[in-house]
Image: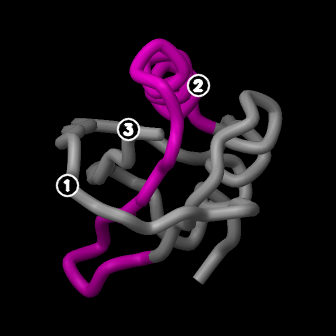
Amino acid sequence: MPIYEIHVRGRVQGVGFRYHAKESALRLGITGYVRNLSDRSVYIVAEADEFLIDGFCDLLRRGNGFSWVEQITTEKMNSENRYHDFEIR
């Protein structure tokens, strides 16, 4: 299954955004992980088909009521990793 690298910028740290990302991923059956970056953005690795990634990004854009998403970028990766769950790192 394809793996995507997703960067989310805006007010996404210190507002529960990673938990929102995990809940959204699990709802859609997406595996991978989410973590904060030092530049105050959030980095997500997501393993799923493209149509699920599109839906996932829509949920991320909506946020959790405390976050504000300014920009989301996605890039398909060439990776052999296989994730079995979605975790917060």
For label 1, count other residues whose C-alpha is less than 10 Å away and answer few (under 14), some (14-19) or many (20+): few
Q: Position of residue 43 (x, y in %)?
A: 36, 64
Which label sits on residue 59? Answer: 2
Closer to viewer: mark 2 or mark 3: 2
Q: Which residues are the magenta region?
A: 36-63
Amino acid type of the residue tagged 1 in the rendering:
Asn
Give the mark nearer the N terminus: 2 vs 1. Answer: 2
Closer to viewer: mark 2 or mark 1: 1
Label 3 secondary element: strand
Q: Which residue is mark 1?
A: 78
Closer to viewer: mark 1 or mark 3: 1
**Residue 55 is a magenta residue:** yes
What residue is shown at x 67% (from left), y 36% (from top)?
65
> Label 2, label 3: how many angstroms apart (C-alpha)?
11 Å
Q: Which residue is mark 3?
A: 69
Give the mark nearer the N terminus: 1 vs 3. Answer: 3
Q: Position of residue 27 (x, y in %)?
A: 81, 32
Give the mark nearer the N terminus: 2 vs 3. Answer: 2
